[in-house]
Every structure is written in structure tokens, then in C-alpha cells.
Image (tube, rainbow, N blue to C red):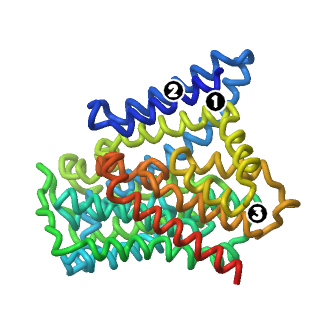
Amino acid sequence: MMEWILVFVFVIGYAAITLEHSIKIDKAASALLTGVLCWVVYVLATADKTLVATQLDEHMAGISQIVFFLLGAMVIVELIDAHDGFDIVTERIRTTKKRSLLWILMPITFFLSAVLDNLTTTIVMVSLLRKIIADRDDRMLFAGMVIIAANAGGAWSPMGDVTTTMLWTGGQISALNIIKMLFLPSVVCLMLPALVMHMRLKGNVETPVAEPEANKIPSTPTERKWVFFTGLAVLLFVPVFKTVTHLPPFMGVLLGLGVMWVVTELIHGEKDQADRSPLSVVHALRKVDTPSILFFLGILVAISALESAHLLVELAGWLDRTVGNITAIGISIGFLSAVVDNVPLVAAAQGMYTLDQYPHDHFFWEFLAYCAGTGGSALIIGSAAGVAAMGMENISFFWYLKRITPLAVLGYLGGAAVYVAMQAL
């Protein structure tokens, strides 16, 4: 009975998020209510309250890492923006043709996501889009393509997506092999939607007119370069930090934020307080989109309740019993990851199948990395990249469903077909 109530609460909350604009309730509020109510249902139906509290503590340890990572990355990006650092990139993008912009921005997103990760890349690229495209409808189309490109780019790199990293650290896949086997499917996953979008796009984009903040003195070219390249360096250092220290990525982001804080304080140390304030980390913290972070928190808390109640493991087991074929299971997990978080789904698969059944670098593990990494693009709340873009650009669920989902599904299935064909050959 408890399971059905839990699913009911999750579905109602999910519906409230998707109908945000119709019901006039912010998605962050719906997500927070859903997350807390799911745990309330679970704890009231469980005799061992201490066990539930322990489970919540364990989940919050992981969730807080993601939230702090998101917060740190957003502040770094806001700090670069405050210094007009993105002008270094936008000044070099001469074209205003939509089609040309598509083929400039998508490869950048794809490869940047493999080096950073899909979440950080999306935050950076959506911030960049705001500097290039004034019209909101055009910007949302490009943001939708950024989500697809970031997820596709993250899938073939052991550091590009959290699920690929899980399989890498869990011993199911090796770094070089996953790059070799998933690069081409990931390229196809991006290229098919990009080609369709290319045919749809016509004309030029309207470039936004910069409106300087009140009381803000523009940063000098030297300051701009220092902050931009320091910000880029600390973000690129995060995967290196993780590999060397084995500490979680949020520690690398917080280290980078600390470095940025010191650098900006030293750069502006001689200025008056009024001149320094708009260029400070404190000001960047005020500008961060807090509702997006709370929305992210609510979604993760809700999913963790389903995981603690073993509903996701049961779902994975049901797939194994009813579907049986590992290729079909992989594709199904990809589509499921568009509804619930891909991390617990992959964790459930890791728990269900041993390395004796499917050895190191087996077809199943590689295919699972691709499907879990790219399948989430099918819905805007199906991936960390999608959730970040949804919050930053206030993209509605149904707008994405209508305009981007068919392209994402086309790319996802196309890449899956290429991988299966590669294995067959």
C-alpha cells in the first residue's frame, strides 16, 4: 500500500512541475513539497524510524554534494559574467546566422562536456547564449540543443557524466575503452538532432544590447582576461582534482571558488567599496538563481525516497524479468532516466548484475553508460543539464516536450543503433 501512495505523491508532484505555468505555482515549490511528502509517506509506513532517518542522512550526503557543486559552479559563472568575461568568446563569434551559430556552439558544448561534465557545461553555455541571443524563443531552442549536446558529450567520457563515472569507478568499464566505443554513437546522438534543427532554423539572431548595471564601473580588459581564464582553469581543474585526490567533485568546485574569491579580491583590492561590490563573490552569490537550486534539491530528495523504498530496484528487477534482452533493458533504462534520476537506476543495475555475469568492458556496461547518459535528454527534467537549463531560462516542460523531445529521442535511438551495429560488426 505504501508503495502505491508513494508513487501517487511522486506522480502528482511531477504533474505539478510540468504544469507550472498552468497552475501558477513555481516548480521549485512543487519539487520541495514532493520531496518532503515522499519521505513523510515512507517514514509513516515504516516501523523502523531510525532506519529511515539513517537512509535520509546517507542520501543527503550525496544530494548536498550535488547542490554545493551546482552552487559553486553557478557563482563562478556569475563572477565571470560580472566581469564581462564571456565577451572574450562572444567577440570572436562574428556570425549572427542561426545555422552557423548552431554548428559553432554544439561542438563546443559536446567537447567541453566531456572535459568538465554535462551540468557545468550547461551552466556555462546557457550563460553564453544570453550574451549572443536576445530573442527568448531562439535562445530556448539553442538551450534545448545545448542539453542534447552536453548529455551526448558527457556519455563517452569517464568524467563527463556522473553515471559513466560510477561505472568507471565501480570497475565495470575502463576509461580508454568507453571513449573508443561510445564516441561515435555519442556523435550520432548529437548530429541527428542538429541536422534536423539546421533545416528548421532560418535567418539571423538578434544580438542583445548590453545594459550596464547601475553604479557598476566596467572591468578593464586585463581584469576581464584574468577572471575569465582563472574561472575556466578552475572549472577544468575539477576532474583533475577528483582523479588525483579521489575527493568528490564538489570539493574541487569549492576549491576553485575559493581561488576565484582570492583572485578577485586581489584584483580589486585598491578600489573603493562601492566600485568593488558589483564585481565581488558576495554580489555574485546574491545573483545566483536560488529557486533553480531548490528545485534541483526537491527533485533529488523525491527520487531518493523512491530509491530507499526499493521501488527503483524493483523496477529494474521487473525489467529484467519481463524484457530479458539486455539491449532492450539498456534502451528502457535510458527512457526511464528521463522520468527518474539516472544515478539510482544505474546503481540498481550495478547491484543486480555482477562482474561474473557481465565482465569488465562488457557490451551491457558500455551500452548502459550510453543509454543512462543520453536518454535523459528526452525530457527536460530527465537530466542534471536539463534541470539546470530549465531553471536558468525558465523553459516549460511542455515547450520542451513539443520542440526538443522528438529530436532528443531521434538522436538517442540513432546513437543506440550505431553502438549495436558496431558490436555486431
Residue at 66% over, 72% down? 178
Q: Nearer the viewer, residue 214 or 128?
A: 128
Residue shown at the point (70%, 27%) measured from the top left: 54
**Residues at marks 2 and 1, CA–CA distance in whole angstroms:** 18 Å
Q: Secondary structure at mark 1?
A: helix
Q: Which residue is mark 2?
A: 9
Q: For residue 166, which numbered disc appears in the image?
A: none
**Residue at position x 56%, y 41% from top?**
63
- Mark 1 vs mark 3: which is more N-terminal? 1
Counting residues from the start of the chain, the first of labels 3 and 2 encountered is 2
Compared to residue 297, the image places residue 246 above or below, namely: below
Report the residue that reaches farthest toward the bottom: 425
Q: Quadrant of residue 98?
A: bottom left
Residue 117 location, x and y as percent?
A: 51, 62
- The amino acid at mark 2 is Val
For disc 1, the marked residue is 56
The residue drawn where x is 29% and y is 47% is: 394
Q: CA distance from mark 3 to mark 2?
A: 35 Å
Q: Is residue 284 visible?
A: no
- Secondary structure beneath dot 3 equals loop
Q: CA distance from mark 1 to mark 3?
A: 27 Å
Say what secondary structure mark 2 lies in.
helix
Q: Which residue is mark 3?
A: 172
